[in-house]
Image (tube, helix red, strand yellow):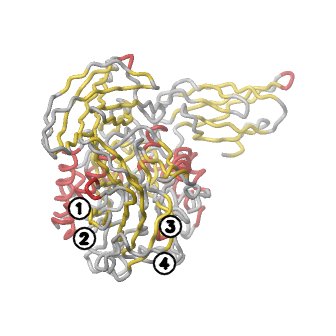
């Protein structure tokens, strides 16, 4: 269930307890967190279930104490451990009639089995997507025992992600660490017997009339023994103000112990429509009320489409840079407390990263909430990381992928920042199995969410194919290519195959420990931009990777690191960070003149030009910020320019200015020499 209200939960059952100086957003305002201290132990012989470690009277005196959310792989004692572990805690409960109690896991890596009061509740496979169980029948008055077994062994065939079945040395593992544990929030919710299980919104603007249609599909769960016909009510707010609307609803009956989808539709008039974009991230709050159950989510009204090899946002072409972010931080592993999400996303935004294929799996929803509020475009990707042809044709693996994709989509389909889904990364897309996978999985995904664009990240287009029908990108709305060199020729080749499809460079880059070191990274991006700016059909470029990370994949350094990042593991900036910010700014800033004035009041004349190559989009409500004031930049279409006079007081020899977005982010910093006619630095 997706909810709008971002509540930073530090309340635990039993009182106020500080949570290891970190906060994790739980989006459900009804959440009862199960954070804090749990008992923990390893199970290297996989004997826990046989020996009934889940039983209520199991002795816990010798078990470790850990704080959940928890990534056991970052503890030096368990750093190299792959296998089963156990978590245990108790919680008090007072049964209430007519209520259902759901136990939620925002994610647990990778295979999870749950017991309540010694009874097995259920299992789940998949390490990055949410799941829940109805534990009402298992609860009792007073203390309840919760036992959870988690296995992080994805180094075997059949898991997603998982090992390859090609028998090749040094190539069996995914490219990132299999960080294990209860890595995201665990909590309870108490629901009425008839409740809203999920809702999907579809806000479609009419760009010519500036009106919009809002459709809502509400999935209602009836846990009673009688069929019900629920009546739904709706409320839409913008900036805290309710918008008066008239709704058309389809009545429906929900059978006993069944779920059903109920649909509703309304129209928003022009005065009530404020479009969402990367520089104007306007959000609405939508509430759905079903008797005593109220759920809410936030939405944005925007239109994303591809046409004539261009990506259009609200009818306007947009070309922007981005980055791939590996969920990895020293001492945290794959944990994503709120402060880290804020730190990473702000660093990405301020270096010009606006359009991301973030990574090969589903990050915390807090990431997408941040992107919604601050304006980012995201291509969400699920699990197929270099699956082999035999694996892609395996019915069991296909079923697991569809499950994980569905869980991802159902969590994220109300986020305006999510503009597309990817069905995999770097598989053999020219082979029949790769073709079948792409066609079938996109078809499946479109049934779940027909409102998004679809793609996958191919590494086979650099030399192959000879004809468009020889490779699976034919089934995509836009081409995504992982290309690490020879960009000009490769991208021209791809365009010749798919002339009507925009090209998104889903990965490019070079490591900081290459033969030319960190200087080589800067030279690489400069050459890359010189190439890409010749190609009008390239709409995005996502550097691999934003941050350094740990891995056991082939090619990893002896210290376990893969130093691809603009920032190091601790988020300290490399020279590449500034080079990326300067190169990926949508505007160019030039000094025109310096005019000394009387009484120490001088004038610096600057010219602002909106880029018309890459990156490129319309600039609206931007400004130039000095240490003492901000001067508005006239709205500029790509290729347009404006001259601005900057008043300068005093006798400083230099002046540092920033180009600032309407959202407040500084995206370009330059220092100008006030005496000479040259710029002194970036």
Q: Quadrant of residue 424?
A: bottom left
Labels 3, 1: front one: 3
Can I make out residue 500 in this image?
A: no
Q: Which of marks 4 and 1 is nearer the N terminus?
A: 4
Residue tagged 4? 62
The spot of residue 315 in percent (x, y) is: 35, 29
Quarter location, residue 654: top right
Q: Earlier in the sequence, mark 3 or mark 1?
A: 3
Asked if the residue at tag 2 contacts the one at tag 1, i.e. Cβ–Cβ closer than 8 Å, the answer is yes
**Residue on which disc 1 sits:** 400
Residue nearer the viewer, 613 or 228:
228
Mark 1 → mark 2, Cα distance in angstroms? 9 Å
Q: Give the Cα separation between the discs numbered 4 and 3.
A: 13 Å
The residue tagged with tag 1: helix, strand or loop?
Answer: helix
Rendered image quadrant of residue 182: bottom left
Q: How crowded is the residue under tag 4: few (<14 C-alpha within 10 Å), some, or many (20+)?
A: few
Where is residue 635? Give x, y as percent. 52, 24
Distance CA(mark 3)–CA(mark 1): 30 Å
Q: Is mark 2 on a helix, strand or loop?
A: loop
Q: From mark 2 to mark 3, how far is it between C-alphas?
A: 30 Å
Up the image or down, 276 lies above or below 420; here it is above
N-term-proximal mark, 2 vs 4 = 4
Q: Measuring from the top left, give residue 499's x and y in whole percent.
A: 27, 44
Q: Earlier in the sequence, mark 1 or mark 2?
A: 2
Q: Residue at x 35, y 62 (%)?
A: 127
Say which of marks 4 and 1 sits in front.
4
Query: Residue at image x 44%, y 22%?
Result: 241
Tag on residue 66?
Answer: 3
Q: Which residue lies furthest to the front in this view?
A: 141
Disc 3 on helix, strand or loop? strand
């Amino acid at each position: 269930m997706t909810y709008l209200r971002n509540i930073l939960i530090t309340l635990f059952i039993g009182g106020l307890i500080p949570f290891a100086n970190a906060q994790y957003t739980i989006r459900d305002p009804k959440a009862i967190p199960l954070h804090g201290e749990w008992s923990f132990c390893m199970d290297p012989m996989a004997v826990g279930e046989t020996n009934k470690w889940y039983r209520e009277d199991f002795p816990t005196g010798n078990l470790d104490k850990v704080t959940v959310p928890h990534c056991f792989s970052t503890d030096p004692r368990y750093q190299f451990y792959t296998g089963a572990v156990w978590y245990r805690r108790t919680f008090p409960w007072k049964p209430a009639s007519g209520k259902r109690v759901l136990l939620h896991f925002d994610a647990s890596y990778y295979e999870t089995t749950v017991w309540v009061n010694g009874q097995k509740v259920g299992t789940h496979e998949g390490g990055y997507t949410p799941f829940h169980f109805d534990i009402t029948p298992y609860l009792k008055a007073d203390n309840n025992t919760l036992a959870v077994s988690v296995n992080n062994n994805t180094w075997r065939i059949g898991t997603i992600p998982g090992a390859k079945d090609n028998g090749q040395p040094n190539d069996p593992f995914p490219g990132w660490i299999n960080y294990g544990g209860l890595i995201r929030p665990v909590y309870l919710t108490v629901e009425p017997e008839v409740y809203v299980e999920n809702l999907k919104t579809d806000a479609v603007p009419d760009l010519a009339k500036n009106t919009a249609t809002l459709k809502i599909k509400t999935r209602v769960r009836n846990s009673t023994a009688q069929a019900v016909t629920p009546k739904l009510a709706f409320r839409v707010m913008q900036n805290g103000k309710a918008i008066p609307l008239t709704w058309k609803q389809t009545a429906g009956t929900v059978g006993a112990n069944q779920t059903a989808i109920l649909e509703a539709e309304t129209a928003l008039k022009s005065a009530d429509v404020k479009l969402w974009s990367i520089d104007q991230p306007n959000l609405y709050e939508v509430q759905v009320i079903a008797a005593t159950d109220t759920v809410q989510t936030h939405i944005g009204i925007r239109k994303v489409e591809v046409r004539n090899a261009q990506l259009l946002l609200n009818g306007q072409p947009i070309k922007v840079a981005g980055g791939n972010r590996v969920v990895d931080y020293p001492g945290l592993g794959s944990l994503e407390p709120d402060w880290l999400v804020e730190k990473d996303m702000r660093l990405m935004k301020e270096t010009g990263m606006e359009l991301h294929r973030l990574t090969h799996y589903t990050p915390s929803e807090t990431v997408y909430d941040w992107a919604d509020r601050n304006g980012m475009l995201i291509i969400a990707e699920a699990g197929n990381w270099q699956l082999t042809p035999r694996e892609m044709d395996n019915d069991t693996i296909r079923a697991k992928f569809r499950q994980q994709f569905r869980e991802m989509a159902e969590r994220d389909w109300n986020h305006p920042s999510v503009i597309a889904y990817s069905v995999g990364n770097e598989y053999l897309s020219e082979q029949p199995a790769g073709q079948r996978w792409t066609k079938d999985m996109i078809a499946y995904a479109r049934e779940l969410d027909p409102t998004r664009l679809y793609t996958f990240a191919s590494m086979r287009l650099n030399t192959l194919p000879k004809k468009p029908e020889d490779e699976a990108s034919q089934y995509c709305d836009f081409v995504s290519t992982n290309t690490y060199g020879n960009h000009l020729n490769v991208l021209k080749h791809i365009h010749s195959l798919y002339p009507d499809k925009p090209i998104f460079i889903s990965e490019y880059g070079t490591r900081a420990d290459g033969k030319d070191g960190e200087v080589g990274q800067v030279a690489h991006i400069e050459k890359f931009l010189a190439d890409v700016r010749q190609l009008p059909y390239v709409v995005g470029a996502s550097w691999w990777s934003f941050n350094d990370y740990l891995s056991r994949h082939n090619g990893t350094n002896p210290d376990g690191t893969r130093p691809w990042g603009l920032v190091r593991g601790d988020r300290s900036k490399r020279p590449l960070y500034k080079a990326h910010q300067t190169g990926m700014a949508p505007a160019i800033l030039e000094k025109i003149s310096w005019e000394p004035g009387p009484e120490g009041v001088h004038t610096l004349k600057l010219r602002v030009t909106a880029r018309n190559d890459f990156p490129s989009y319309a600039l609206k409500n931007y400004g130039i910020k000095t240490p003492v004031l901000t001067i508005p930049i006239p709205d500029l279409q790509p290729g347009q320019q404006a001259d601005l006079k900057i008043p300068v007081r005093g006798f400083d020899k230099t002046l540092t200015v920033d180009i600032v977005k309407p959202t407040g982010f500084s995206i370009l910093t330059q220092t100008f020499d006030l005496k000479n006619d040259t710029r002194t630095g970036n």
